[in-house]
Amino acid sequence: MSTFLKRETKREISILGQKYTVDFGRDHLAFIFKRVQVELGQIEKKDRGNLGQEECFYEMQNEEKVILKRAIEEILDFQKEKFFIFEKDDTIVFHRDIYTYLVEEYIDVMKTKSPYSIERIEGL
């Protein structure tokens, strides 16, 4: 009897010493990444009225942090009351770095060949 081998899509990751198990094979993650891409593009195109350059930049950063934080929470599958990653560092750079790290992990999982890919079966 043969056994079906499922591709491993769960990863143990650590962010600031806090460990998480993330299943990067969940279907809706691709939609989260696409939504973030669209929403970030909309931030740049948004009419900011008579705001000065400094106020405009500050508003854009805050909007980007909200988008990235929501996406990170969804990817890590967190309930709001347990999410403390940004308590000590709420900078835009930190939000971008964590989001980019999660995207890279997702890409790495998606690059892993299925046990049933033609190349793997043929030994290429």
Image (spheres, helix red, strand yellow):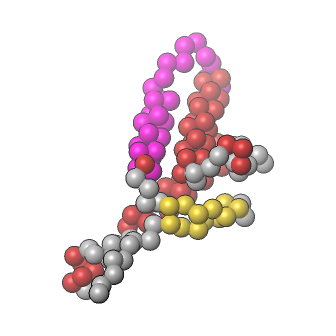
Tell whether 69 sits left or right of 110.
right
Res. 51 image quadrant: top right
Q: Is residue 116 above or below residue 93?
A: below
> Is residue 32 magenta-colored?
yes
* Residue drawn at 39 percent across, 64 percent down: 110
User: Is the magenta region chiefly helix, strand or loop?
Assistant: helix
Q: Where residue 103 sits in the image (x, y, percent)?
A: 49, 55
Res. 56 image quadrant: top right
Q: Where residue 123 sits in the image (x, y, percent)?
A: 25, 86
* Residue drawn at 48 percent across, 23 percent down: 46
Q: Is residue 116 above or below residue 27?
A: below
Q: Is residue 3 above or below residue 40?
A: below
Q: Which residues are magenta?
A: 29-54
Q: Where residue 73 sits in the image (x, y, percent)?
A: 60, 47
> Is residue 8 magenta-colored?
no
The answer to whether any part of residue 54 appears in the image is yes
